[in-house]
Image (cartoon, grey):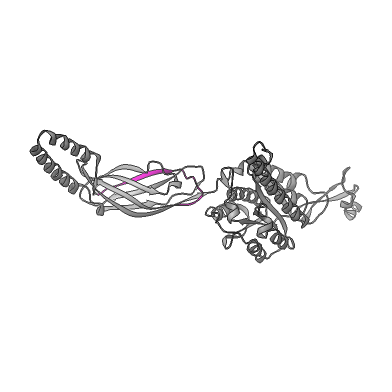
Amino acid sequence: MALTGRFVALTLLGVLLAIASARAAEVYAAGLVLVALVDCVSAGRITDVRLQRQPSSAVRLGETGETRLRITNTGRRPLRALVRDAWVPSAGVQLARQEIVVPRGERRVMVSALRPTRRGERRTAQVVLRSYGPLGLLARQRRLPVPGTLRVLPPFTSRSYLPEKLSRLRLLDGVVLVRQRGQGTEFDSLRTYVLGDDVRSIDWRATARSRDVVVRTWRPERDRRVVLALDTGRSAATRIGNEPRLDAALDAALLVAAVAARAGDRVGLVAADVAVRARLGATSGDRVLPTLVDALAPLEPNLVETDPQLLAGEVLKQGGPRALVILFGSLDTGADTGLVPAARALATRHEVVVASVADPALARMRTAVGSPAEVYRAAAADLAIGERDRVADELRRLGVHVVDAPADRFASRVADAYLDLKAAGRL
């Protein structure tokens, strides 16, 4: 049972009446209580209410979705109720409390807009239902279990780079073909020699059958394998600007996957820290992005120290021919956590790119030396940047490609690394 504002207001009126006459106040109070109890008994019974939540469609972070709650009144009295749909705060529910009137034997649908502020699975476990009588003095109230889930997908803000990357891919794969054969290229066609062609690409047999000098053209191979390896440990929780480092990695992974799918390559995924959090076998074609988005959506950084050897081992266990492995990690802790040994193990069998989001705040701290406190911060930032550079240099000596860029350019730089390797015939 719950008191309403109307009952409280009438009670205060009785207090004022008591100042004038105690006897009149007693009669008034007894009458108010009696009327309120009758009003509460006349309210629709919550046990006669059936609640059913309709499945919510997935929504990208930053966009608006909705949840629909179907309320059925199976009782003999009309239901006048205040319904509170108790989602977690990060689900961003709009109009969580709504007044609903459901005649007996009928049903109504309560629609609430959701604008989530966090990626992943946003859940609700219960609905609070408050049923009022005709006078609205007292109400029946109960919490009812009505579980629901809203899947919040990564925002994929880097899709604005997609036209540019696909245009470069078309130049690479369709218009400007590789004139010289390299590792990871396949024969495309024969054409007449033009000034500037590499003489090593001349096909002498075809030239003997033709009046012109004929050269072979090559193009990057299709159906190559790209493995996205994500560190979901403590370093992935570090906030770079307004978002965790993991979210920047997910955005870059989606951009690379979209370009690789258009290029005809297969895309796989491994995400781990001290345990494997997500695994996706090699996928190609139109299934790449939907499958990858579903696998990435529930990932959250865990406050544990990642085991890079576990991540590398999961990639190596997949076997298969030489692949491009893009390892999303952090150069900040590379020397302490075993990033370099893990990259070395991967580089023995695969082409490896280590991608790390740089923090622009370090560069700003490095140059601010006004006060003694700022001098100490600048020294700490200088040490951190020096350590990042040392780890990056050690990785490059192993033949590993390093992408170290701020969050706003990170996805574009990782996609460029993939396209550069494809253009060079390294895949």
Question: Is residue 112 highlighted in magenta?
Answer: yes
Nearer the observer, 309 or 313: 309
* Vertical side of 379 occupied by 340: above or below: below
Question: Is residue 120 highlighted in magenta?
Answer: yes
Q: Position of residue 67 (x, y in %)?
A: 41, 47
**In this rendering, does residue 72 appear at all?**
yes
Magenta stretch prevailing secondary structure: strand
User: Which residue ends up furthest to the front in the rendered image?
Assistant: 372
Quarter of the image for residue 311 reads bottom right
The residue segment tinted magenta is: 105-123
Nearer the observer, 271 or 380: 380
**In this rendering, does residue 362 appear at all?**
no
Q: Is residue 62 left or right of residue 101?
A: right
* Vertical side of 81 occupied by 18: above or below: above
Q: Identify the residue shown where x is 43% and y is 50%.
A: 56
Quarter of the image for residue 163 reads top right
Q: Position of residue 75 (x, y in %)?
A: 22, 51
Q: Position of residue 257 (x, y in %)?
A: 63, 51
User: Which residue ends up furthest to the top in the rendered image?
Assistant: 20
Q: Is residue 369 left or right of residue 108?
A: right
Q: Identify the residue shown where x is 51% and y is 42%.
A: 62
